[in-house]
Image (spheres, rainbow, N blue to C red):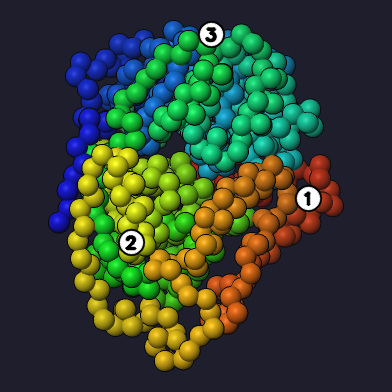
Amino acid sequence: MTSNIQTPALTPEAPIAAVPTFAEIGLHPSLLQAVIDTGYTTPTPIQAQALPSIMAGNDVMGAAQTGTGKTAAFTLPILHRLIPLSNTSASPARHPVRALILTPTRELADQVYESVKRYSRHTPLRSTVVFGGVDIGPQKEALRNGCEVLIATPGRLLDHVEQKNVNLSQVGILVLDEADRMMDMGFLPDLDRIIRLLPAQRQALLFSATFSNEIRKLGRTYLNSPVEIEVANRNATADTVTQIAYPMSGDAKRAAVVHLVKSRGLKQVIVFSNTKIGCGRLARQLELDGVRAESIHGDKSQADRMKALEAFKAGELEVLVATDVAARGLDVAGVPCVINYDLPHSAEDYVHRIGRTGRAGAKGEAIALYAPAEEKYLLDIEKLIKTTVPRAVLHIPGELLARAAPREARTGASSERPARTASSGRSGERGTERSTERSTERSSERSADRPARPSRYSAPPKPIDEFFTKPYEPSPAALAAAAQANAAPAKPVLGAKRQVGLLLGGAFKKV
Ligand code: AMP
């Protein structure tokens, strides 16, 4: 019992009527070549609308679902506008920062950087990316070599501004990507500071997967008579994603994940947990159940996050358990299914989560596991997406249920632990942890070489397994990197950044 959500055609496979080609839009020949190299034949709807407007120099406010080709929709026209200013000089002074792209997360920053590199490969334009959680030294060096396009997370960019590694006085184009999440993560004061460093005369572009009233307000503050582009129904879900919801007790959820993955032979499934502690615990438990799983959340060091993502992208994991912050903006090709292990408390997060599957026209499935206490969140989601998510009963083999049952239920032992809600998290903990996730992300983004902060959550009185309750401990590699950085902050260490570059198929070099 599944159903497809009917929303306007949004995918490259289903372009809107009379879509002009990239050549008809008038894209520079070197960019056309890169588009052909990449294998794109037709602009997606957001690209067909945004490219001409941005190329003409307008401010643009774009609302597009994830996976609609939004990155190329702003990257290509920016490069088009910069090509006349490009040069082959070796002098850093001839390569000032002319376009600044701000993103809320490190992963998204790196993905946008990969796109910029790919599309600008036939031009002499230089680009680089800076984000927190990795050594600042190589970034400093890259900035000093000059780059026309700079992709950055706000906190780390301000670190570079404070260290005078970067001059933003010639920025003519500003992009706020995933602006809704930037607001959500408390980046507004940082944004304000950055924008005050830019010339008043500039083109500004704001992209957001969903448009809220706050985002419109932000647009009015930073943009000048923007052209509004909205290719999707507000808060709609992609029509390539089939949704279903299975009611069950909180204790049955883990068995349900194991059953779904194993019985269908699923690979590269993203399982969303609302909390960092729940995320790490679930990945560990799934491993014990014989599912190849890793977790990715804001308390993990950047190196560990990239390692998990690398294994996931390489198809080495069946499951990546993720929190919203860590998974935001990930573009992993071929994710067949996302599972909401916890329903998000914000209905908009549901739209983002299920946008990880069904990308670029591929089919995807979004499964929600919900305990009775979570039904209210499902109703909120349905209100937002204006669709009923079909319910069905999932038949889970008894032996899996028995394995996943709490130890006291299996052994008959009594427990002094506080009563749990029907869902997986401890009562009252989830909301707090969720906001901690975001603030931790933001603060660790600022810190150059600091290992991730330990979790503030205390262990329950009778821990079943210390691993599940002890705070996050940075990996030995992260600690070594931090120690090294503290000892010699200016030393150019390429390790962490090189990992990022390699992971995403590139090398840490300007283009
Ligand atoms: P984005 O929404 O920018 O994360 O892009 C989602 C996916 O769509 C990425 O994997 C892009 O490579 C892909 N994509 C972007 N533009 C096109 C296009 N015109 N045709 C086909 N695929 C595209």
| Category of crowding for the residue at label 3, using alpha-carbon neighbours closer than 10 angstroms: few (below 14), some (14–19), many (at least 20) | few
At mark 3, the secondary structure is: helix
Whether residue 65 is visible here, answered yes or no, is: yes
Residue 293 placement (x, y as % from top left): 44, 65
Query: For the residues marked 2 and 1, what is the alpha-carbon distance in whole angstroms?
Result: 45 Å
Q: Which mark is residue 84?
A: 3
Q: Position of residue 409 (x, y in %)?
A: 40, 86
Picture quadrant where residue 376 is located: bottom left
Q: Are dots 3 and 2 in contact, CB under 8 Å? A: no
Tell me: 334 left or right of 507. left
User: Which quadrant of the render holds ligand 1?
Assistant: top left
Horizontal and vertical percent for residue 111?
49, 38
The three-letter amino acid code for the residue at tag 1 is Ala
Mark 3 or 2, closer to the camera: 2
- Can you identify the residue that label 2 sits on? 370
Mark in the foreground, 2 or 1: 2
Question: Is residue 470 rendered to the left or right of residue 242?
Answer: right
Measuring from the top left, give residue 11's x and y in whole percent: 27, 32
What amino acid is found at the position of numbered circle 3 in the picture? Answer: Pro
Q: Amino acid at mark 2?
A: Tyr
The mark nearer the N terminus, 3 or 2, is 3
Determine the residue positioned at 55% across, 35% down. Answer: 182
Answer yes or no: is residue 332 visible: no
SS class, disc 2: strand
Instruction: Please tell me how crowded label 1 is: few (under 14), some (14-19), or many (20+) other residues with Cα within 10 Å.
Output: many
The dot on residue 485 is: 1
Q: Is mark 2 within 8 Å of ligand 1?
A: no
Q: Nearer the viewer, residue 109 or 477?
A: 109
Label 1 element class: helix
Q: Sequence-wise, which precedes: disc 3 or disc 1?
A: 3
How far is the residue under mark 3 from the one under mark 2? Answer: 54 Å
Camera-side residue: 175 or 310?
175
